[in-house]
């Protein structure tokens, strides 16, 4: 099983600032099958990025994913109030699939 | 537009059974693997099970092996999760999701296991 460790646990930033979220895997993820999701309170998660760096349809270009192997990053270039949420990484290349524990982004 | 609508959740006693259903629309169901993911109250996401396009391959998280069964009916564009021998720790919101470049999610259905 691949363990995904996200950091930091909580990020508190002001609107317009840049957010950098990390996801580290316990071993290399094949084909960079790594996705990022946003979850707001009381809602289902929604897909932001897949295959480490491909933005999902309809996702604002301030969201970008990067990385390969064991180290992946989600960057939100200019935070907006509606970006307040929990963000999860997820590897989906092989079973068992796993999720990171989440990073909570708070907007000051 | 991808639409996934779960049903069949509710309150059940420990040791009981439930069958979750997921009605899919807006895409060609037979060309996608499907997934169940759950989220316990106040906790993170946990992958539960996958099924391939024709139902011949199934994979489960260790904690549900032997108790849960994932299945699909391609003629009815439907996904199922049969949950037996339910435990208190199975309490969660259960999400149906379409695999393929990440997951596209349903709205989720709560399952509560309690006496």
Image (cartoon, coloured by chain):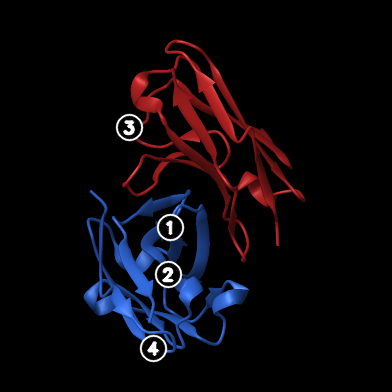
Chain colours: A red, B blue
Q: Are marks 1 and 2 on the same chain?
A: yes
The CA distance from mark 1 to mark 4 is: 20 Å
Q: Is residue B114 left or right of B65 when viewed as pictured?
A: left
- Residue that mark 3 sits on: A58
Compared to A46, does B51 lie above or below?
Answer: below
**The C terminus of chain B lies in which quarter of the figure?**
bottom left
Asked if marks 1 and 4 touch (Cβ < 8 Å), the reply is no
- Residue that mark 2 sits on: B91
Q: Chain of mark 4?
A: B
Q: Residues within 10 Å of mark 1 (few under 14, many from 20)?
A: few
Q: Position of residue B54 (x, y in %)?
A: 42, 77
Q: Chain of mark 1?
A: B
Residue B16 image label: 4
Q: Residues within 10 Å of mark 3 (few under 14, many from 20)?
A: few
Q: Position of residue A62 (x, y in %)?
A: 44, 20
Label 3: which secondary element: loop
Lower position in the chain sequence, tag 1 or tag 2: 1
Asked if marks 1 and 2 touch (Cβ < 8 Å), the reply is yes
Q: Residues within 10 Å of mark 4 (few under 14, many from 20)?
A: some
Label 2: which secondary element: loop
Lower position in the chain sequence, tag 1 or tag 4: 4
Label 1: which secondary element: loop
Q: Nearer the viewer, mark 3 or mark 4?
A: 4
Q: Chain of mark 3?
A: A
Residue A73 image label: none
Instruction: Find residue A98 and report its image quarter.
Output: bottom right
- Residue that mark 1 sits on: B41
The CA distance from mark 2 to mark 4 is: 12 Å
């Amino acid at each position: 099983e691949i363990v995904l460790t996200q950091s930091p646990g909580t990020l508190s930033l002001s609107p317009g600032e840049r957010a950098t979220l990390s996801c580290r895997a316990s071993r290399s993820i094949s084909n960079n099958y790594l996705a990022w999701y946003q979850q707001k309170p009381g809602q289902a998660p929604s897909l932001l990025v897949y295959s480490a760096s491909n933005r999902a349809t309809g996702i604002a270009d301030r969201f970008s994913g990067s990385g390969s192997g064991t180290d992946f990053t989600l960057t939100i270039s200019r935070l907006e109030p509606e970006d307040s949420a929990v963000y999860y990484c997820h590897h989906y290349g092989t079973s068992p699939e796993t999720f990171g524990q989440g990073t909570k982004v708070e907007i000051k | 537009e991808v639409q996934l609508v779960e049903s069949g959740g509710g309150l059940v006693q420990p040791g009981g059974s439930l069958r979750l259903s997921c009605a899919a629309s807006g895409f060609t169901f037979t060309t996608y693997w499907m997934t169940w993911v759950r989220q316990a109250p106040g906790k993170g996401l946990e992958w539960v099970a996958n099924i391939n396009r024709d139902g011949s391959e199934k994979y489960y998280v260790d904690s549900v092996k032997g108790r849960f069964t994932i299945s699909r009916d391609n003629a009815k564009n439907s996904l199922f999760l049969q949950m037996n021998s339910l435990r208190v720790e199975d309490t969660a919101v259960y999400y149906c999701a379409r695999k393929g470049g990440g997951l596209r999610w349903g709205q989720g259905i709560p399952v509560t296991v309690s006496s």
